[in-house]
Image (cartoon, grey):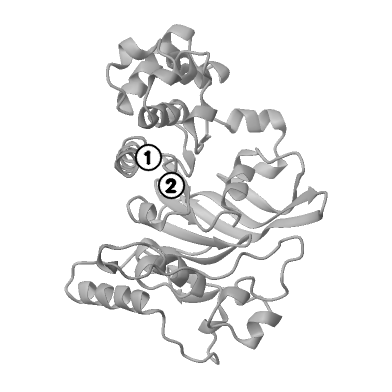
Amino acid sequence: MAQKILEVNHLKINFQTFAGTVQAIRDVSFNLKKGETLAIVGESGSGKSVTTRSIMGLLASNAKIVSGEIKYKGQDLLLETEKQMDDHRGNDISMIFQDPMTSLDPTMPIGKQVAEPLLIHGKISKEKALTRAQEVLELVGIPNAATRMKDYPHQFSGGQRQRIVIAIAIVNYPEILIADEPTTALDVTVQAQIIDLMRELQEKLETSIIFITHDLGVVAGIADRVAVMYAGKIVEYGTVDDIFYKPKHPYTWGLLSSMPTLDIGSGKLASIPGTPPDLLDPPKGDAFAPRNPYAMQIDLEAQPPFFQVSPTHYAATWLLHPDAPKVEPPAAIKKRSEEYDRLMKAGQISNPVEGSLN
């Protein structure tokens, strides 16, 4: 079994605002294994970015980590000094942000920007840093990297700028790479190229990746495991096959049903009614209950615990309780599951490796 390189345990984060205390992250736990990709998915505001920024120690000034642990190789990062975190950032753990134009300095040649993390961490001389920068730019697919080292960000296309941002993030060969919706600002063709690039880099560098997105279609092409977030909590957790073909939480059903597919034709695309809850005053029970057509009285009264579906699959929904009524998932989800079963029987899909929430 692969080594756990990162463990997040019972993380709670609040934000102080003029309106009051926002309980943004409400008891989140997950782990990341060496060399794997964990995708964290959910609607905007579900807590994906806040969770991963806390790993880097990059929370806003009005944020407070109320409790929990963030362990990198067994060491709790929340107990480290700012100097120690500076040593980790860009060296052991790096982050790719959503918009490359806000990540790049418009006044600095891209060669110097890629070399900068090496110089900050004092690993090599300036000359060697620029040589490494060129090598990494070539690695991420920038054409004529040697001659383009002195060019500025505005002289590159959107896809190339994102490749440059990736180059900056990996120049120190970090063990963990956090990608915060790195393909959202790109067109579909360039998205696919960036996903392919990240897979290739992971194989070459053996980097562990946390990939944040609201697009489940992107997840299928890159992730090993998936954590589904809603209202500051993880509500379902499993392998890609678990989540795509055997989902158990009604929120995951809604996300998958709202994905456009080739067989939709002219039919109406499904959507999830309502809006997420106000986390200034989180609901007593299941936060998804008001939007859940399968909600029961207990959903309004108590938060569901995680129920184990399989050795790799967990979901926090009262529908998995032994006394809960049996409900049929939406037709689109049922169709996915039946197709998965057919492929399993035909031997075209192998059983996933065992894993756990913590």
| Residue hosting label 1 | 206
Q: Quadrant of residue 253?
A: bottom left
Q: Is residue 101 above or below residue 134?
A: below
In the image, farthest residue toward the front: 266
Tags 1 and 2 in contact by the CB under 8 Å rule? yes
Q: Mark 1 is on which residue type?
A: Glu
Q: Is residue 225 above or below residue 323?
A: above
Give the percent coordinates (x, y) of residue 14. Answer: 74, 53
Rendered-image quadrant of the C terminus: bottom right
Residue at screen point 53% across, 28% down: 103
Residue at screen point 43% across, 67% down: 312
| Label 1 crowd (10 A; few <14 / some 14-19 / many >=20) | some
Residue 358 seen: no
**Circle nearer the N terminus (1, 2):** 2
Circle number at residue 34: 2
Q: Relative to residue 75, is residue 206 drawn left or right? A: left
Q: Relative to residue 334, is residue 310 drawn left or right? A: right
- Compute the Cα span from label 1 to label 2: 8 Å
Circle number at residue 170: none
Q: Relative to residue 324, is residue 86 drawn left or right? A: right
* Relative depth, front residue between 94 and 285: 285
Q: Is residue 139 above or below residue 263?
A: above
User: SS of the residue at dot 1?
Assistant: loop
* Relative depth, front residue between 235 and 288: 288
Give the percent coordinates (x, y) of residue 53. Answer: 61, 43
Q: Mark 2 is on which residue type?
A: Lys
Rendered-image quadrant of the N terminus: bottom left
